Image (cartoon, grey):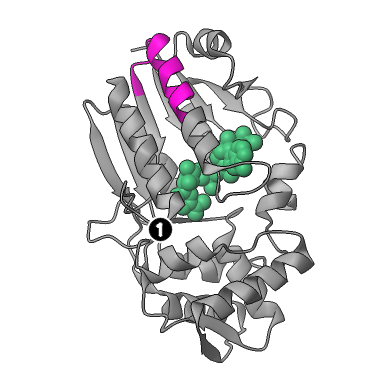
Amino acid sequence: MNTRHAVTGAFGYSGKRIAQRLLDEGSEVITLTNSLKRPDPFNGAVAAYPLAFEDETFLVDTLDGVHTLYSTYWVRFEHRDFSFAKAIENSRRLFHAAKLANVRRIVHVSITNPSLDSPLAYFQGKAEVEQALAETGVTHSILRPALLFGGEDILLNNIAWGLRRFPVAPIFGDGEYKLQPIHVDDFAQLAVTEGKADGVRVVNAIGPETYTYRELLRTIGEAIGKVRPMMRIPAPVGYALAWITGVFVGDVMLTREEIAGLMAGLLHVDDRPAGRTRLGEWVKEHADTLGRRYASELARRRNRSADYTDL
Ligand SMILES: NC(=O)c1ccc[n+]([C@@H]2O[C@H](COP(=O)([O-])OP(=O)(O)OC[C@H]3O[C@@H](n4cnc5c(N)ncnc54)[C@H](OP(=O)(O)O)[C@@H]3O)[C@@H](O)[C@H]2O)c1
């Protein structure tokens, strides 16, 4: 079996962990990335090429001889510098190039509960990308994580950051909506396993524990020694607070849609866990570092030469 694989964003978050797993297995790994100048954790072992969506010939040549393409590419929200519509189009281009290059399999990262009918552009766009992948006819696995955690993640880190700094913990609505976080290394292992599977598969990539949002805040607060009184607030007030905080830290902390998706229970599915690492234990082990610094989505997009851990 050909063991040359391509991973998007191998100097980023999940792509880095997937690439590392593949290298550990002795595979040759290349990456397609927007961040060619980010610190290379692989000491040159992963050849890096630009994610040049506009240049089909280049993409096809780069993917020539690749067995599995691991596609992590997406944008978190709409912004003047990037959009869901463009991310959908770019994903189509990438999949099409993979087909032309005769890539054998695509492992694509989506989200729990994508839907073409969703009023939320993130979940709707993810469903469109899944559909575009199916239309290529390339055999594939679609992985649907709810939330990734384990170093370099944004949401969990920034919850801890907020608990460290503010005297109360705002809860959007009743806080009883659920989440199923999976550790990024378990997720990477799942991705690599799916790269070796056959046919078309869709896997909910969820961890072994289900938390309500309230429980998640309590778990993190207890681990870092910052249990705060929880204050119920309406979603629009939560969004306003996140917006104001975002202004101070120079980021988009949370979007309206992210709050709506969370409150609608879209980060929860009724399925078997695919990961083993328990968030509760991981948080205790990393209590000293979790949330010491704010993790900024926009800084990661604007500074493409620093490591995620510094942004
Ligand atoms: N993180 C989570 O908790 C979570 C939860 C559910 C689903 N997911 C899905 O999992 C996949 C991987 O997420 P991740 O957190 O591991 O992402 P990531 O490493 O930060 O980014 C993945 C890839 O997308 C590119 N990218 C991200 N935002 C971009 C932007 N605004 N403009 C241009 N390129 C951008 C990155 O560019 P570079 O090449 O420059 O690094 C990288 O190639 C995504 O499809 C995401 O929707 C993540």
Q: Quadrant of the N terminus?
A: top left
Locate ligand 1 by image quadrant.
top right
**Quadrant in which residue 191 is drawn:** top left
Check disc 1 and give the amino acid type.
Thr
Mark 1 crowdedness (10 Å alpha carbons): few <14, some 14-19, many ≥20: some
Query: Where residue 62 sits: x, y (%)?
Result: 54, 12
- Placement of 58 over or under 156, stated as above or below: above
Q: Look at mark 1 in the image and give the residue it sits on.
A: 277
Query: Where residue 293 sits: x, y (%)?
Result: 73, 64
100 falls in the magenta region: yes
**Quadrant in which residue 163 is drawn:** bottom right
Residue name at image x 64 percent, y 48 percent:
79
- In the picture provided, is 39 more to the left or to the right than 10? right
Residue name at image x 53 percent, y 30 percent:
8
Residue found farthest to the bottom? 229
- Placement of 146 over or under 16, stated as above or below: below
Range shown magenta: 91-105
Residue name at image x 71 percent, y 72 percent:
244
Residue name at image x 51 percent, y 29 percent:
90
Query: Where residue 103 sits: x, y (%)?
Result: 38, 15
192 falls in the magenta region: no
